Each structure stands twice: as structure tokens, then as C-alpha cells.
Amino acid sequence: MAERAFSATRLPGFATIAVVVFLVLYLPIFTLVIFSFNDANSVAIWGGFSLRWYQIAWANDDVKEAAVRSLIIATSAALIATTVATMAALGTTRRAAFKGQTLIYVIINQPLMVPEIVTAVALLIFFGFIKVTTGYQGLGYLIAAHSAFCVPFAYLPIRARLEGMDLSLETAAADLYATPWQTFRKVTLPILLPGIIAGAMLAFVISLDDVVITEFVKSGGQDTLPTYMLGQIRRAVTPDVNAISTALLVLTVLLLTAFFLLTRRRD
Amino acid sequence: MNKDVAVEVRNAVKAFGQGDSAVRALDDVSVNIRKGEFFTLLGPSGCGKTTLLRLIAGFETPTSGEILLDGKDITRDPPNRRPVNTVFQSYALFPHLTVAQNIGFGLEMQGRPKAEIADVTANMLALVQLGPMAQRKTSQLSGGQQQRVALARALAPRPKVLLLDEPLSALDLKLRKEMQIELKRLQLETGITFIFVTHDQEEALTMSDRIGVMSAGKIQQIGAPRDIYTRPVNRFVASFIGESNFLSGAVETGGVRLSCGDLVDAAGSEGRSGKVTLAVRPEQVRLTRAGEPGALPATITDWVYFGTDTHCHLALSDGTEVVARLQSPATGDAGLEKGKAVALRFAPGAAQVLGD
């Protein structure tokens, strides 16, 4: 009999472990989604199917305000972070290797490595100082903070796309009479676009569900959806939080699916 | 200024790195490339041939020296302002564009009218026999077809000079032979000056009007393929292009006295004196019977059968090794036996005195 190639699927307990992992990962989320359709007032006892909590959440002006605020912040942060990340990725890959390259990577990816709570406290103090000096209290602080920690999430897919892109493409464009700007517009940008969109969506999702930094940076009355929910749960656990979470989950899943489809596409 | 010269490179030096660790990729290279010729830069990897090509394209600027195109100094012009196009080793086709859009790219960047772009693109597609592929993405093409798109794209703006950076190296042998013929045909049909970079001596010999052999950042010899092969100027050229036997000797009246004591005729000994090295191609070595007058006594040390020919390894009386490439006989082994005493002769004019 021919010897079969090694496969992890034949290791003892493979199937069991796989099932356990999937259960641990998804069972809580399934429970959340199912109980968001619960007709009962309790979050733990099933009382029949109903869209009641969705209606209640939808009718709640605080929820709507927080949702709109979340979307404004996430959209602005995604746009700013993606622009910065695109420039950073071009600057670090469309050139010969240079001294200090690793240091630059570390600096760009700093938000991934520094504990979020440290950044949050630092921003609280820093923005507090600016607030006192300028008197400005608006959403700008949240947008700035979110833009900053979203940069590495936007940077990574863009850089990955650029690294897979032959540098001689730009050389060829220049050889064929394209000015540096035309080269960027007609060659670099169109090929890079899926990476940029992927980066923007990842940044959007990361901004949308941030709690720690938002909680520290926000001024009064600047709740985003996640911090609003956190505030609600502190008082009483009501099933409308399930409904909001499910809505957020659906949005995130849609965006992440689009992200995978875009990054999977290879030319 | 010479009106027949397309590209003139004057004393080009290209150094990479700083101070003591600087490497001279090009070391004072001067060459004139004539209008309408197929000129090949041939040499091993790292000899500077690609650097020279990149200087002409404008992807690098020389550390010192000048590059002239049609007599005009273009040394500092960026690549997009030079009427010179390149076929890249990796083809560098734009993956987001169709075949036709790739070919029309240069014309579009020059701001030519749409009708003209469509016209030229159609002509180019016909020229490289890719008409039916016009609307395909380049990733859907085979290697040979991609190669043709790269050629058409570089030819479409009708450059004064076409630069080709080892364009055939990624193709398999059969396709490479086809493309060699195709390239030569395109060059004759378009009349454009081609500068072709390769490390493949056969490619250089079969396609070129002239070859510039490069080594260690310098041009060693420039000449027609036949000159390069039959009259190599130094040991590098003689061994890089084809194979050679090297024999040491001293110049005397009437020829060169080899170290084994025999006197032979040699081209290029005029004006030379003292110790020299002779190069003789293996196929120019003839075997004869031992004791034949005027022939060099030798002993067969080994022989290897190669199909069309047989390589016979010989030792002269002082032990110098010589290889003779003999046509294999239809039957038998031509009487080759290890240890057999024979004699050898060089074909008239085959022995060449090398420079230092």
C-alpha cells in the first residue's frame, strides 16, 4: 500500500479539537443573535420569537445618536488612516531598501504593540491639555485618536499588496513617457486600489467597535455605539443591547467578507 | 558629429556605494552604437551590461561621463523624456490593463489622438501576431505571448532606440529560438536600433550585427560576431565566447615558438615580442599520424563522445593540454585510443595571439 502524505487531519483528536474551538468561538455569538429575537424581558429565558428589541433600540434616540456618531467617526478615521497608510506604504516599499527601515515599520505599527490602555491614558492627558488651552470640545479628538490607531490596520493590507507589485511596473511606465504623477495615477493607484479599499474597511471596522480609547477620550454626550452599550450594561442588562450588537455584527461581517474577497483577488 | 551614430556613450562611470566600499559597475566605458543596427552587450552576470542599458534608458545616471542620443546630450534627462523604450526581463506588463491598452500606453502618455493610438495599436498587434488577444488581460497570456506584448508596447511609440534586457531568458529553449528569429525580423521591418543585453553567447552570435563583450565593468571587445569568435583580443573573450585552447609561447621571426619547442604560424604576432598566449578553437585542431613533418607530436589522454562530434583530449610533448573537436565518424571510434601517439596541426589562420 502506498504511504500517504502527512496530514494534520489524521492526528488523534483533530476533529474533536476543531469542533471545540468552533464552539468556543461561535456559541456565544449564536446565543447573542438568537436572544436578540427573544420576546421575553429577560436576557436568559426564551419567550418566543419577536423583533421587539430591534424596534425598541430603533426607537431610542440615544442609540440612534450614538450610531450616527460611530459612523461619522469610523468613516472619517478610515479615510484619514487609509490616506496616511497609503503614503506610508508607498514611502516604505516603492524604493530601494534603506537604513532604519525596521524602525519605521515599528513606528508605523506602534498602535498594534503599545497596550491600548496606555495609549488611552496618554491621549486623555494630552487631549485634556489641548482642551484646556483651546476650549475645543468637539468630535475632532475622537476622530484624531481613531485615525491614529487605525493606521497600522490600513497599512498592513496596502503594504502587502505593494510588496507583491513588481517595482519595474513604475519603471516601465516612466520608460513609456509617463510623468511621475501619471505613473501614480495610471499604474500604481489602480493596481493598489483593492489593497486601499481593504485597508479602509479594516480601519472602519476597528474604529467602529473601539471601546477603551473612546471611553477615555470622549467628552460628555459623545457616546459611540460601543460605549453607549457599555453604559447601558452597567445599569441593567436589557435585550436591546443584544439587538444592537447583532446589527453591528451583521455590518462587520459584511465588511470583512468584502475585505476577504478583495484581498483574495490576485492579478 | 557622426550622423550614423544613434547612441554615443562617452567615458561612462557608474559607481555604487561610497568611499572605499564603492563598486564600479561601469569603469570608463565608451561605445558608439550605429543607427539601425542590432547591437548586443554580452557578458557574464555582474559585468555591467544591464547597468549600461539602464544608463541609456535613464533609470540610472552615470557617476561621470555622458550619454548622447542623435548627438544630443541626454545624460540628465529622466526616462519619460527620452525617445528610448525598454523591453524588461520581467516584461513588466500592466496587470490592470488589456493587451491593447498595454500597447497603447506609451502613445497615450505622449498625448497622441485616440484615432492614432487605435491605429498604431492595431498595427502592432498584427506585427506581433496577437490580433485576437487584444481585449485579454495580460495574465491570461502565455510567456511567449507576454513577451510579444512587451515588445509591441515598447515599439508602438516608435522609439529611436529599443533596449532589450535579457528578454528571452524566461522562455524555454524552443520558444527562445522562435523569438530570436522574430526579434531579428522585427528589427529589420522597423529599422529601429536595437540594443540587446544577454549572457547567452549563442543568442549574441546568431542575432547581432555587432557585439560588445563586457567583463568587470569594461568593454573588452567590440566587433561583428565572426570577428569576436575568430579574433578574440584577450583570454576573457576567447574563453567566454566558445571554447579555446590556450598555449604559451614566445614570438620569433616566422611565428610563435610554443613552450613544447615547436614553431607555429599565428595571427596577430606582428609588432609583438617576448612571451605571448595563443588561442586556438578546438574545432580548428586537426589530428594526423605521428611523425608527420611540421605537425606537433602529441599523445591522446582521453576522448568523450558528444554525438555530432567527439572531443579528443591531447597532451603536447611538454604536457600542455589541447582539446580537439572532431566530427564523429559514421561508424567506429576514428581510431582514438588512450595513450596513442599522434600529431596535431592547427588549421591555417586558426591560432590567434591574445593581448594582455
Image (cartoon, coloured by chain):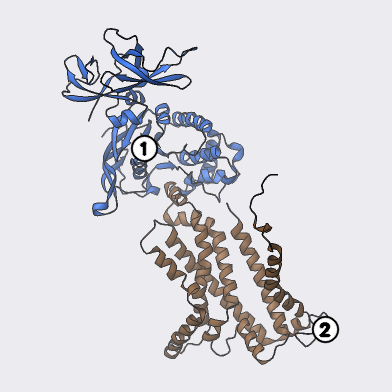
Chain colours: A brown, B blue
Is B171 located above or below residue B248 in the figure? below
In 3D space, how far apart are the residues under numbered discs 1 and 2 (Cα atoms)?
81 Å
Vertical placement of residue A13 versus A3, above or below: below
Q: Nearer the viewer, residue B16 or B314?
A: B314
Q: Chain of mark 2?
A: A
If the image is split into quadrants, where does the C terminus of chain B sit?
top left
Which residue is denoted by mark 1 in the rendering?
A: B44
- Crowding at label 1, few (<14), some or many (≥20) Cα neighbours within 10 Å? some
Q: Is residue B356 left or right of residue B229?
A: left
Residue occupied by mark 2 = A47
Which of the 4 image quarters holds residue A30? bottom right
- Residue projecting furthest to the bottom: A235
Quadrant (top left, top right, bottom left, bottom right) of the N terminus of chain B? top left
Kindly tell me whether residue B280 is visible in this rendering: no
Q: Residue at x 66, y 83 (%)?
A: A64
The picture places residue B16, in percent across and down from the top left corner, at 30, 50
The amino acid type of the residue labelled 1 equals: Pro
Could you tell whether B232 is left or right of A172 in the image? left
Circle 2 — which element? loop
Give percent across and percent down for residue A32: 72, 78
Is any part of residue B291 visible from this angle? yes
